[in-house]
Image (spheres, rainbow, N blue to C red):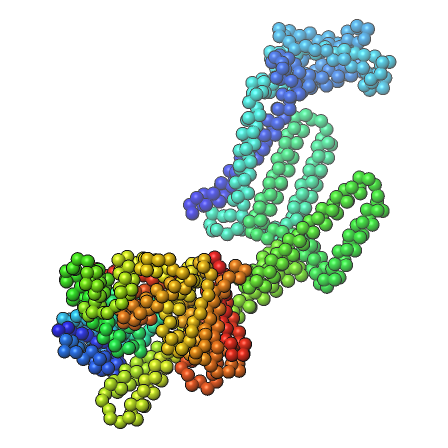
Amino acid sequence: MKNKKWKYSLWAKVVSWIILVTMACVTAVLGIGAKIIQADNFYNSTFQAAEKAVMINEAGSYQDANRIIQEVVSGSYSTASERGLIKNATFKVVDQSGKVLLDEKTTAKNVIQFDVEQRYDYTTSSYYRSDTVPTYTATVTIDSDFPYHDRYEMWHQITKALYSIQYAIFYIAAGVFILGFLAFIFLIQAAGHSAKDEEIHTDWTYRIPGDLYILLWGGLTTVVTAVFVSAANAMAANNQGTIYFVGTLFIFIGCMITICCLNVAVRIKKGGFWSHTVIWWIIKNVAAYFNSFGLMARTVWILLGLFFLDALGVVFYSADNNMLFWFFRTCIVFGFGIWLANVLKQLLKGTQMLSSGDLSYQVDTSKMKGPLKQAGENLNHIAIGMSKAVDDRMKSERMKTELITNVSHDIKTPLTSIINYTDLISKEPCENAKIKEYTEVLTRQSERLKKLIEDLIEASKASTGNLDVLLNPCEVNVLLTQAVGEYEEKFKKNELELITTQPDHPVRILADGRRMWRVFDNLLNNICKYSQHRTRVYLDLTEKDGKAEIIFKNTSREALNISAEELKERFVRGDSSRNTEGNGLGLSIAQSLTELQKGTMDLQVDGDLFKVILTFPEI
Amino acid sequence: MFNLLICDDDPDIVHALKIYLNDPQYVLYEANTGVQALQIMQEHEIQLVLMDIMMPEMDGISAMVKIRETSNVPVILLTAKSEDSDKVLGLNVGADDYITKPFNPVEVSARVKSQLRRYTQLGSAPLKPQTIRTAGIELDNCTKKVTLDGSEVSLTPTEFDILKLLMEHPGIVYSPKDIYKQVWKDEPIGNESTTVAVHIRHLREKLEIDPNEPRYLKVVWGQGYKMEEETRK
């Protein structure tokens, strides 16, 4: 970081300081110049007129004339004592009767000349603005070639300079000001940094709290200024000396302010400016004390405070006071109300999201305070806790599914051999009728085991949602037709008569065709397995409130002494004997798959009538 | 004569398969790991591979990927993994067919025959005019005969018309109503289109090795039926 090194080196800071101080002084001087230009009306006058105005107002010839009148009248005038500073001017004093009291001759060719009138009461040695006091007139003649070095000559030079830059002065002043300001900014930026490392450096002064430091520094500056000003007053009106003195003081105050600014800048850079102030400490302690009260006590204190303020308003009633107070109070109440409403809104949103099941939503408590913040954080903790519980549950379900899948794979391999060799045995010529019979049992049961394993995987996956479901527009009429086509033979074999009713117009739902077929397959299979022979089976498609309802109705062969809810449970079957084929997973799979496709499956048992209703939203 | 390679880590299954595929046309080779399978592939000219997936040393998928680097031989995966994702993976990395354990022996021999026919004969026999072919199914419009993997299948005239319609437009899904309109040349009234579904079921039972998992005459549930497009080059 060569650039940084250059920037934060000591000499860069020193140069900046010098630029800052110089530019501040130049700005001040230019400011005074601008004031003169304005006061003496440079823009609307010739150089001569401007110079004359400067001579009267700034160079002090007006005061000179007054003093000379005073001295001449009181008789203490001496030419020699005055000449040191005002060699270029000559004076002529005339009283009101036209009597010449003083007449200094001049040899000058070009002159600036003007009269100064002055009432002067020589008996009391004081100036009067009363008609009874005699009036004296002093004619001041200034040699405009300025052969001597004196105050007039200095002002002549200043006027010449100011007149020549009367228009440019503001731009120059602005430029100089900006330059000084840039130096200031640079110092602020570099404050605390050093060329050696990246850290912010502080000294012992930073242990003083920030606001106390500003206060001390301000106090010190004020005291020093006050001392110097009183000293300057005592030094009396030595013109030139005073200017230098005021200038020095000016620079001193400027430097003090700059140092204070730099100190504050370093504090802010270091961080924690506010937390290291007396005000902050007081507020913190008061707030901590206040917060140690209970919620009710705090509320009461706040209300009491407001009441007290109201009372104050009544006691010190005046129209202005009351308006101001009322405005102030309203502002506070308004702001507090808005803040409270906003916080409550966020808390409400949090509870809403939570109750709607979105556990990932977190209330933003960064802008909340006190008990409301606690409420928000508690809400967030509830959400986190709940989502963790849900995640754990999901994970354990997934692991269960994985376990079932893996175990099933392991079972399948030996089962393959069992099925195949049973099949091979059954194909071997054999005289023994018993062996034939036993082989048939083996074949049937091993096939059943195969189906059970496949259903087990499917059921565990469907119930945990570990299945891909692609929802596409699907025409239920067609699905029904296809299902009937597939099952026609099986129904005939079981001596069942299938009656379907469906609307003429197509009914469309969103479903995954293959999964939907699996649902139909399971339900129709159940119907074939458990229906009383020679009965009718109804398969209806109806529309109700924008929903498609598919209703399967059949008459059970066995008495259904079991509730609809229990039937949906895994491994529960309508016949308690468990003799027929099937494993009790069919309904469970059908329900899980239906729900995965955003539908619902409802079971109704009414005597021997068994009814399954699938409901899907229509599109 | 076809050289068949059976690869499974369970010797009982290999033995059973050897019994089922006992045919004078087939010469059977046996391997118990993917590595052994690759070795035999190098030593012999193999026309078909039956391969298990879960095996020691090298699993069936890796072995198949290796085989596919050099050979176009048909590979039938024979595995206990029955999930859709497993099937998709297997077929995507180059398997020609996928049979899940426990398998139906008749199905295995039918699929082996079908794959061999496709590997050795497809494209070589010139097509007669008025004949449509989709994979193993050949439909002759003149003689009104349909053959599956070379052997004749007897169809009813309605079944023949439905099959012809679907084979003429492979990949296109026809709803039962559409098929009814085109084949019966009439508007279906009430549940008459159910007849179509019954016919299709019969067709599948005649043409497919496993009617519940059809390979040619596919059911698009909730939409209709279609003849699978030929994807193999």
Q: Is residue A485 above or below residue A442?
A: above
Residue drawn 62% across and 41% down?
A: A256
In the image, A307: left or right of A348?
right
Q: Position of residue A591 (x, y in %)?
A: 47, 71
Q: Tell me, yes or no, if residue B227 can be seen here.
A: no
In the image, A235: left or right of A166?
right
Residue drawn 40% across and 71% down?
A: A521
Q: Position of residue A245 (x, y in %)?
A: 65, 31
Query: Depth check: A563 or A180 in front?
Result: A563
Residue drawn 37% across and 82% down?
A: A449
Residue A321 lies in what quarter of the image?
A: top right
Residue drawn 66% across and 53% down?
A: A341
Query: Depth check: A169 or B39 in front?
Result: B39
Q: Is residue B160 above or below residue A606?
A: above
Query: Depth check: A330 or A133 in front?
Result: A330
Residue A356 lies in what quarter of the image?
A: bottom right
How many marks are shown on the rendered structure? Answer: 0
Q: Position of residue A553 (x, y in %)?
A: 48, 72
Q: Is residue A115 above or below residue B94?
A: above
In the image, A499: left or right of A266?
left
In the image, B183: left or right of A325?
left
Q: Is residue B23 above or below residue A105?
A: below
Query: Depth check: A538 or A161 in front?
Result: A538
Q: Position of residue B34 (x, y in %)?
A: 23, 74
Q: Tell me, yes or no, if residue B15 can be seen here.
A: yes
